[in-house]
Image: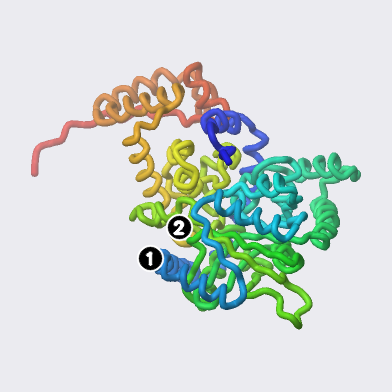
Amino acid sequence: MASTHNNFDFFAASEKAIGDTELRRKLANASGHHLDAAARTRAEFPRYDEEREAARRIKAEAIGRLDELLLQLKQRLETNGCQVFFAADAAAARNYIVGIAKRNGLKRAVKGKSMTTEEIELNPALERAGVEVFETDLGEYIVQLRHERPSHILTPAIHLSKEDVGTLFHERFGMTYTNEPERLTAVARDNLRSIFMTADLGITGVNFAIAETGTLVLVENEGNGRFSSTLPDTFIAVMGIEKVIPRLADLSHFLEILARAGTGQKITTYTNFITCPRGHSELDGPREIHVVILDNGRSAMLADPVMREALYCLRCGACLNACPVYRRIGGHAYGYPYQGPIGSILSPNLFGSGAGFLPFASTLCGACREICPVKIDIPKMLLHMRAKENRNHLKWPRGASRARRAVARFARLAKRPRTVRTLSRIAAWMIRPVVRDGYVRWMPPPFSAWTRTRDFPAPKSAPRRKPKSGGV
């Protein structure tokens, strides 16, 4: 199946998004709330940095022993009664899952939140096979009703306001318009409850897979993952190969930092442990469990000594909240399921050269590295990928090429400090008539774009350097 990501124009999408002031307001409000909450919960937890170091060490160990741990995980899962399938790529994963649905005559699927199923484009494949698919995470449910992709790894509907959701529910369900979150959530709950009760297939992602015990761990806030994994008779868990960790005792270190980094909670509401299908004497739980373990380009990342660190990612979404580029353009502008700084690394590796421009969608400010709960050096990897793309003669659109040439000219100029000081004095003198209270609020073209949405600090005339006096 051809990917729907082909021929995506990042530059056109980002230009459109950055001109949407309402979108920028929504993104700033939501991501700002996450950042403030995360800062508070970290400050209340003195051991936060110690737990980050411990989690990073565990991920480094797991990725270093990945082949061994995956074989151990498979053995434990099968001993527990689960069926395990290693998928080399997205097509293999889709075909296996669709095959289960056809073989068992399954017609209605409920899905807990899963970025990996977004990655493999599972929903369209199931729908073509005659399976109704319902997203059950509230944010995923909302964007599915709007026929959109999630716009954030953690909060899929971050680009929408409560008024947007109220309008959507009014149009789709015929309810009286309201923008009260409690009433909107109640409507979604009522609609989804009957779907849960009639579903014959449940699908979720996996946050952690414990090799020692063959345990799948799902963390969530709404309970939809628990419903999806326990009510239907057939349950499928989809995970990337990097989700495995060695020991059950390792899990606590991740649970201490995951919610604090992503949503600012001390811990997520539900932590689910799935080990085996329903026993003969048990009243609930699936009768059949399948675990799909996906490669899809991850082995190539593992082989690259710089890129393998990206496999430490916990999918917490914290780097998106901190990224000035993401907060300006939102997730849809990236064109791929994984957005923001970590998405700019994952997407080119998982989806190919069409995403080759994404590593350049960063200011390299380092905010992503500082907030990452496992201290992934995202700027280092972005620079590594930029160098690789340039060596591969990445073909830039005309507008982007002009910008790159301008930056190259500035780089040459910056090597001549005397010229820079002279030009700075001239610029300060020329711009003086439009300075008000130390800021420039309007400039003529071609500089008008700078002041369209912001005030530009007035440049100060560079001081003349006095010649050095004699002496040692």
How far separated are the C-alphas under marks 2 and 1?
11 Å
Question: Residue 270: which quarter of the image?
Answer: bottom right
Q: Secondary structure at mark 1?
A: helix
Give the amino acid at mark 2. Leu
Tag shown at residue 64? 1
Q: Earlier in the sequence, mark 2 or mark 1?
A: 1
Q: Is residue 101 above or below residue 282?
A: above
Instruction: Give the camera-side residue of 110 and 462.
Output: 110
Image height of 104 relative to 156, above or below:
below
Residue 370 located left or right of residue 200: left
Circle 2: is it few (<14), some (14-19), or many (20+) Cα within 10 Å?
A: many
**Which residue shows up at 53% across the image and 31% down it?**
7
Which of the labelled discs sits on residue 78, or is there none?
A: none
Report crowding for label 1: few under 14, some 14 to 19, many 20 or more residues within 10 A (C-alpha): few
Q: Label 2: which residue?
A: 311
- The residue at the point 84 percent across, 56 percent down is 186
